[in-house]
Image: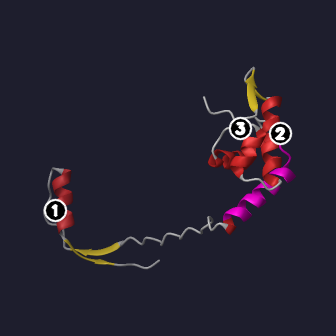
Amino acid sequence: MAHIPYGYKIVDGKAEIDEEQAGVVRALFEGYISGLALKVAAEQAGLNIYHGSAGRMLRNTHYLGDEYYPTIIDKALFDKAEEIRVAKAGALGRIRELDKPSKVVANKSFTIKLIEMKFTDPFAQAEYAYSLIESEVATVE
């Protein structure tokens, strides 16, 4: 069974809001938006978690509501917390752009001598055929 986000409970196979926990989730968002650090906002909301866990809670889109989970946090509050989180991360130099991997171009052209021998063993035939490759020509796409 998958993990149920904090603030919800499963009743008769459906996710429902656990009002006590949902209040804690709302307090976490409000504390963070008011300027508290992640860990401090979590502690004041009543959560004993690390700052990374608090950050993941702030990024959990299930709190906005979806086809399975009811809404705990409105979009404006969620977006404001994300805006602050990204701004703080940028100010601390924790946002970096990943280098785009260079495109690998495989050689698709080569020259090969005439295949004169036939083997019944397919591995031996392949080994023989590959041994006849004279040169590879790099192609640019």
Mark positioned earlier in the residue sequence (1 or 3): 3
| Left or right of 52 on screen, residue 123 | left
Residue 26: give its label: none
Q: Main secondary structure of the magenta part?
A: helix
Q: CA distance from mark 1 to mark 2?
A: 65 Å
CB contact under 8 Å: marks 1 and 2: no
The residue wearing badge 2 is: 71
Name above or below for residue 90 compared with residue 55.
Answer: below
Front residue of 122/6: it is 6
Q: Residues within 10 Å of mark 3 (few under 14, many from 20)?
A: some
The residue wearing badge 1 is: 128
Name above or below for residue 72 compared with residue 134.
Answer: above
- Give amino acid for label 1: Tyr
- Give amino acid for label 2: Thr
Q: Position of residue 107 (x, y in %)?
A: 36, 73
Name above or below for residue 68 compared with residue 118.
Answer: above
Element assignment for label 2: loop
Mark positioned earlier in the residue sequence (1 or 2): 2
Residue at x-position 73% and y-position 65%: 87
Badge count? 3
CB contact under 8 Å: marks 2 and 3: no
Front residue of 89/40: it is 40
Which portion, as a residue range, is magenta? 72-89
